[in-house]
């Protein structure tokens, strides 16, 4: 393969076609169903699907035998399914999603979740990096190979619309399309992160998640705090005490031993190697306020905390008025949305049940305590890399980034990976992405780093070419 020709082809396509289309995509507020229960009536998801469908159909029209279908199961978000013939009797499954996280506050002046803005080589706006770019990266890689007449296996591209809600629709589609998908020998997922923008990063593991809503109620209605305090236990204090059953507030360490697993030795070594590559960038990428410091100065331990140890976050709060409207009232209840990130091999449902037991057993003062646990999601630990893929990834990263591939687990959850790992235990995985320092997926000021997206596209093309020759 002529790498210079590959780069020219991809740069032209990204500049002339992909970036303008992603700019239009960012304008669409197609929030995932968990954040827009009326998504179907609002029509934003359908608008995004049609935008992607138009672009992809035009590109696939030049490939004999290529097919695209928007598959629609009853009462479920749609899925874009593409089947692209190849020269090899084998199948590669490429995955991405087009649904988005909600707006969030704190966007910089002149930017916003649905206001695409290009600043230098960064395209700001919700969904560009997570994970709107994925379909374009996958298809442009395949088109680049065909432009040089380089063989590749049959490629199946799936773009779902429910990932940010936990991909609860996806298993139904995978089962529905199972015969048409076949058994892929390689899965390419473009919905992950990168430790920096200087090399290709292969994701070696993903955490699971156990989430739910903790409600503590001590009164049936609010009463004067001067009258009740000292007699009625504070709902806030009790909620705080219950959280201490689960998490050590001084260290952040989770107390529930059932949520820990034995960390594989190779993942510990990879964390140490990633720490050497990244240095203080392991934590300096975060917008710390004031003089806030990370929880430890051991960089490898920070990486392992983020990838292989349980960690609790309170991500929502209800029952507490805004300060400007707060009266002297003893609050009758407080509700907290809890998100527990789990080690990759920890059972998600068992973890959710362990949290429920710890939080609800023997409530203080006999208060009404309920933890409404959501279905847990088990994480994913990548299988051992086949020699051909390890060599291919290294060559691709050196050719297109100028540095060797790096390996690191990610702290997020991609339910699709655990599902596929169980369904296709012999399959190899290339899980990567463009969510690098400050790209801020799920938060304000999310951006897509265009040069990295182009290079990831080139790396996918290189791996597809090597896969066909293995």
Image (cartoon, rainbow, N blue to C red):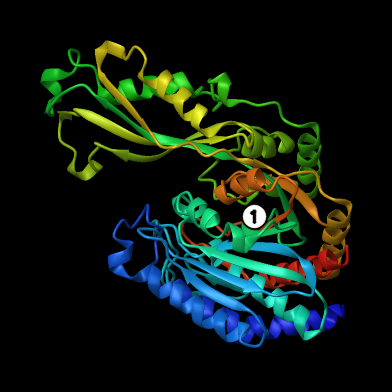
Camera-nearest residue between 293 and 353: 353
Picture coordinates of residue 23 (x, y %)?
A: 50, 77
The quadrant where residue 193 appears: bottom right
Residue at point 64%, 46% (across, down): 423
Picture coordinates of residue 400 (x, y %)?
A: 81, 70
Residue at point 65%, 39% (across, down): 307
Instruction: Point out the image quarter for the C terminus.
Output: bottom right
Label total for image: 1
Query: In the rendered view, would you say 274 is above or below 73?
Result: above
Estimate how packed mark 1 is, as few (under 14), some (14 to 19) or many (20 or more) residues with alpha carbons within 10 Å: many
Picture coordinates of residue 252 (x, y %)?
A: 54, 28
Position of residue 87 in the picture relative to residue 13 (left or right): right
Q: From where the camera sits, is residue 452 visible?
A: no
* Residue lying furthest front: 179
Position of residue 12 in the picture relative to residue 128 (left or right): right
Camera-nearest residue between 34 and 125: 34
The quadrant where residue 430 appears: bottom right
Instruction: Point out the image quarter for the N terminus.
Output: bottom right
Residue at point 67%, 84% (across, down): 63
Query: In the rendered view, would you say 136 is above or below 198?
Result: below
Numbered disc 1: secondary structure: strand
Q: From where the camera sits, is residue 203 visible?
A: yes
Query: Which residue, given by chain and number where applicable, does mark 1 sit on?
Result: 193
Query: In the rendered view, would you say 461 is above or below 16?
Result: above
Picture coordinates of residue 431 (x, y %)?
A: 69, 55
């Amino acid at each position: 393969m002529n790498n210079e020709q590959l780069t020219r082809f991809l740069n032209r396509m990204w500049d002339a076609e992909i970036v303008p289309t992603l700019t239009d995509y960012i304008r669409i507020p197609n929030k995932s169903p968990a954040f827009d229960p009326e998504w179907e009536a609002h029509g934003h998801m359908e608008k995004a699907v049609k935008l992607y469908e138009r672009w992809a159909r035009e590109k696939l029209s030049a490939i004999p035998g290529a097919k695209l279908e928007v598959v629609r199961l009853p009462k479920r978000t749609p899925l874009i399914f593409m089947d692209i013939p190849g020269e090899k009797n084998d199948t590669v499954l490429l995955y991405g999603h087009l649904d988005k996280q909600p707006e969030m506050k704190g966007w910089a002046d002149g930017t916003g979740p649905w206001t695409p803005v290009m600043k230098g080589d960064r395209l700001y706006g919700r969904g560009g990096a997570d994970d709107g770019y994925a379909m374009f990266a996958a298809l442009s890689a395949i088109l680049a190979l065909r432009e040089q007449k380089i063989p590749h296996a049959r490629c199946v591209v799936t773009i779902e619309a429910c990932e940010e809600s936990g991909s609860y629709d996806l298993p139904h589609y995978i089962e529905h399309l199972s015969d048409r998908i076949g058994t892929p020998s390689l899965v390419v997922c473009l919905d992950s992160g990168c430790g920096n923008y200087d090399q290709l990063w292969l994701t070696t593991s993903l955490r699971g998640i156990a989430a739910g809503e903790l409600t503590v109620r001590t009164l049936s209605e609010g009463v004067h705090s001067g009258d009740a305090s000292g007699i009625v236990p504070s709902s806030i204090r009790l909620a705080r005490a219950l959280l201490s059953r689960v998490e050590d507030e001084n260290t952040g360490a989770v107390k529930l031993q059932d949520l820990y697993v034995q960390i594989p030795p190779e993942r510990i070594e990879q964390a140490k190697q990633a720490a050497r590559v990244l240095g203080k960038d392991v934590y300096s990428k975060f917008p710390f306020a004031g003089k806030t410091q990370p929880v430890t100065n051991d960089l490898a331990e920070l990486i392992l905390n983020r990838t292989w140890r349980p960690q609790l976050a309170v991500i929502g709060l209800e029952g507490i008025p805004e300060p400007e409207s707060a009266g002297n009232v003893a609050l009758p209840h407080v509700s907290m949305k809890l998100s527990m990130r789990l080690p990759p091999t920890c059972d998600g449902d068992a973890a959710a049940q362990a949290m429920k037991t710890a939080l609800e057993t023997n409530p203080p003062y006999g208060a009404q305590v309920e933890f409404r646990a959501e279905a847990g999601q088990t994480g994913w630990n990548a299988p051992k890399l086949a020699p051909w893929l390890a060599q291919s990834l290294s060559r691709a990263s050196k050719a297109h980034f100028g540095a060797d591939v790096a390996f690191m687990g990610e702290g997020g959850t991609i339910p699709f990976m655990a599902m596929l790992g169980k369904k296709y235990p012999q399959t190899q995985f290339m899980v990567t992405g463009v969510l690098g320092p400050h790209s801020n997926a799920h938060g304000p000021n999310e951006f897509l780093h265009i040069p990295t997206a182009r290079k990831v596209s080139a790396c996918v093309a290189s791996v597809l070419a090597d896969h066909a020759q293995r």
